């Protein structure tokens, strides 16, 4: 390692030490599992907004999205970003306040708990199915984050991928286990700032290195289908493929995923005042639009630098390291820039850590609170509940490390599948639970099962048939789940009076 490498590594270590310190600071503020998993509903509007979006974006923002833009141009990355921007705004606009009020009214601290309390179930079947779904989709989602950390240190310093991944996972686990939700949310705010600095630094340096924005655009114009929203560049043929209306619709469907993301929905439940959600919505929406726009443009810049032979040409999943390559290129120019490059690398870690910590908490709560205590009625004291919560979190993280062992896995593709899983299962159930008085527990259960099954069936059976069927699995699975909820709810009788009365009381609180 040379002097520049030590400067970069020192910056990253300082950042990681800071994150672990935050965890220990908040460790004494968790008096019970409600504090550990939901922070006692004490989050302010800024922390709520930025922790929600930082935990949303993950390593996908600084690795997956720029990598897709680098390889294929603006169509897939652009329509995905548009769908996510619209989904972010609508989620804050129509779900956040209602979920905050409803979850507090029924005393729910997790998403499975909310579904169970909303429909007043006694057998806890809905809670159990919800918790299992969280475990099924969050473990690979978390694994993609660990994988991103491993790729970062392997690309930077030539460290063994597996060793780097394990060390990164250990750091994330340490501050999440000690500080819980408050630590995760506070570090998410810090991480969102670091991510922003990373994005801005890279794009300014990249534009300067390539000779200006005009050169980036000229490079894109000279690649078939690259600088287009109606065509996509085919890296195998060098030509352009049509990006038709159905494909665009399925890509926009990324936005539907927001309605079912447990780690984002928990932020809505945790804000201290429902009337501050409007402020959070504005902050979150602006940050998401700007950050995704910059991330896509970084992919364009990287492609231009590769074609001018300033950077090596990246193929396949290696394209997801374009931000890493740009930061390395930056650090080679001047020792002062090495500190900024270190912040960029810390930003990539921030993307990963801000999502992984939230996912670990959500998955841990599903096992300890919803399956052990809820479904199997295991009696535990608050102290024992905290120990079990931390133990379950550790076990889930270990499974994530095992799944991330394959170094060649694509961060974008893994996140895409997990996103579809949550969007198609929890999204329709959440929307109908909040906005349709007539929905009942049987409809909700049908929606969860149909959504989960259809994600797998469409991804691995139907989509491979090609043609019009080769669309993002979230859209058809979401529609099927919604139809199942409506059909089964109408076929199984009107909800009990107690449920209707609570629904009406919540509606009154929203209007006050």
Image: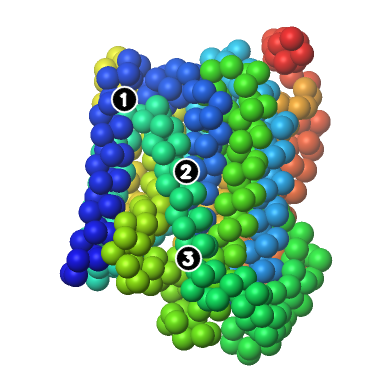
Residue 251 percent coordinates (x, y): 69, 60
Foreground tag (3 vs 1): 3
SS for callout 2: helix
Q: Which mark is residue 192?
A: 2
Q: Nearer the viewer, residue 90 or 448?
A: 90
Q: Which mark is residue 26?
A: 1
Which image quarter: residue 298? bottom right
- Circle 3 residue: 205
SS for callout 3: helix
Real-space Cα distance between discs 3 and 1? Answer: 37 Å
Q: Nearer the viewer, residue 164 or 477?
A: 164
User: In the displayed structure, would residue 279 be above or below residue 342?
Assistant: above
Residue 159 percent coordinates (x, y): 22, 67
Quadrant of the frame with the C terminus = top right
Which residue shows up at 65% across the image and 41% down it?
285
Real-space Cα distance between discs 2 and 3? Answer: 20 Å
Q: Is residue 44 visible?
A: yes
- Kindly check if marks 2 and 3 are in contact, taking CB atoms under 8 A apart as contact: no
């Amino acid at each position: 390692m040379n002097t520049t490498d030590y400067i970069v590594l020192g910056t990253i270590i300082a950042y990681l030490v800071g994150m672990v310190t935050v965890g220990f600071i908040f460790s004494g503020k968790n008096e019970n599992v409600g504090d550990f998993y939901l922070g006692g509903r004490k989050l302010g509007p800024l922390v709520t907004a930025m922790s929600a979006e930082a935990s949303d974006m993950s390593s996908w923002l600084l690795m997956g999205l720029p990598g897709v833009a680098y390889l294929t141009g603006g169509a897939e990355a652009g329509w995905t970003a548009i769908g996510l921007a619209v989904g972010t705004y609508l989620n804050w606009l129509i779900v956040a306040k209602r979920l905050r009020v409803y979850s507090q009214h029924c005393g729910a601290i997790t998403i499975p708990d909310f579904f169970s309390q909303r429909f007043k179930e006694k057998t806890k079947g809905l809670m159990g199915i919800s918790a299992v779904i969280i475990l099924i989709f969050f473990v690979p989602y978390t694994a993609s984050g660990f994988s991103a950390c491993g790729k970062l240190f392997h690309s930077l310093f030539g460290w063994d991928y597996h060793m780097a991944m394990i060390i990164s996972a250990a750091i994330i686990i340490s501050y999440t286990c000690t500080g819980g939700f408050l630590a995760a949310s506070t570090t998410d705010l810090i991480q969102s700032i670091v991510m922003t600095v990373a994005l801005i630094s890279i794009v300014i340096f990249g534009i300067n290195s390539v000779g200006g924005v005009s050169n980036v655009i000229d490079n894109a114009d000279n690649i078939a289908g690259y600088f287009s929203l109606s065509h996509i560049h085919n890296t195998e043929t060098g030509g352009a493929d049509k990006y038709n209306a159905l494909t665009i619709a399925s890509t926009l469907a990324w936005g539907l995923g927001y309605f079912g993301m447990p780690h984002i929905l928990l932020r809505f439940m945790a804000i201290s005042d429902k009337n501050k959600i409007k402020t959070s919505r504005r902050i979150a929406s602006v940050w998401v639009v700007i950050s995704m726009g910059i991330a896509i443009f970084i992919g364009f810049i990287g492609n231009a630098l590769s074609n001018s032979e300033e950077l090596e040409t990246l193929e396949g999943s290696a394209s997801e390291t374009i931000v890493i390559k740009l930061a390395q290129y930056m650090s080679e120019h001047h020792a002062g820039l090495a500190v900024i490059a270190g912040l960029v690398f810390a930003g990539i870690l921030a993307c990963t850590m801000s999502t992984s910590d939230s996912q670990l908490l959500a998955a841990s709560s599903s096992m300890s609170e919803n399956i052990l205590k809820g479904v199997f009625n295991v009696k535990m004291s608050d102290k024992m509940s905290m120990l079990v919560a931390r133990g379950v979190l550790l076990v889930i993280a270990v499974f994530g490390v095992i799944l991330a062992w394959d170094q060649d896995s694509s961060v974008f593709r893994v996140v895409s599948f997990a996103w579809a899983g949550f969007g198609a299962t929890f999204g329709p159930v959440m929307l109908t639970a909040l906005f349709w008085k007539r929905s009942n527990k049987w409809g909700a259960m049908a929606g969860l099962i149909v959504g989960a099954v259809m994600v797998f069936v469409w991804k691995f059976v139907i989509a491979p048939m090609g043609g019009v069927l080769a669309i993002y699995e979230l859209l058809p699975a979401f529609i099927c789940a919604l139809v199942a909820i409506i059909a089964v709810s109408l076929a199984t009788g009107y909800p009990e009076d107690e449920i209707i009365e609570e629904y009406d009381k919540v509606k009154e609180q929203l209007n006050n």
